Amino acid sequence: MSETPPDRAPALRVTTMPADANAYGDIFGGWLMSQMDMAAGLVAARYSKGRAVTVAMDGMQFHAPVAVGDEVSVFCDIVRVGRTSMTIAVEAWRRDRHQEEQCRVTQAQFVFVAVDEQKRPRVIGEG
């Protein structure tokens, strides 16, 4: 069964570079996690209309490797909104630079809290 990525624009798309990889050309898991956090942060800030910070992330399981030169697309869906927090489901997909086939490499849920200028929780939507 072939999976297909979501049929919408990703929150973030980037091409992997040699500095993001180990000596064998495999992308560091921490680099991929940071891209997912960045994409979810963009979505959280836009939705909350202001600053939002990461407070939690559930465990990640890697399904496929990512290599230097691969295109990584990160998709985000807001799955829960509370008074000051948001839970965002995040999926990372890779596409080999020479092919059109894509595959999901990992997914996780990130929790963000909207904060004010003093870095205290604020009600979502209140800037």
Image (cartoon, grey):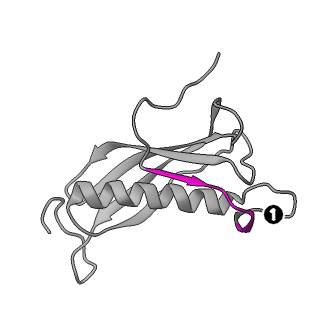
Q: Nearer the viewer, residue 5 or 79?
A: 5
Q: Residues within 10 Å of mark 1 (few under 14, many from 20)?
A: few
Note whether 65 is above or below 42 in the view shown.
above
Q: Tell me where residue 40 sits by quadrant.
A: bottom left
Residue in the picture at 34% in, 54% down? 43
Residue located farthest toward the bottom when viewing the structure as drawn: 118
Q: Secondary structure at mark 1?
A: loop
16 in the magenta segment: yes
Q: Residue 12's x, y, as percent? A: 46, 52
Residue in the picture at 86% in, 64% down? 23
Q: Tell me where residue 1 sits by quadrant.
A: top right
Residue located farthest toward the right when viewing the structure as drawn: 24
Q: Please state which amino acid type lies under the numbered disc 1.
A: Asn
Instruction: Say whether residue 70 is left or right of residue 110.
Output: right
| Residue receiving disc 1 | 22
Q: Nearer the viewer, residue 116 or 25?
A: 25
Quarter in which the C terminus is drawn = bottom left
100 in the magenta segment: no
Q: Residue 44's x, y, as percent? A: 32, 57
Over which residues does the magenta segment extend? 12-19
Residue located farthest toward the left when viewing the structure as drawn: 126
Residue in the picture at 59% in, 24% down? 3
Instruction: Say whether residue 50 is left or right of residue 107.
Output: left
Q: Nearer the viewer, residue 54 or 99?
A: 99
Q: How many marks?
A: 1
Q: Nearer the viewer, residue 78 or 59?
A: 78
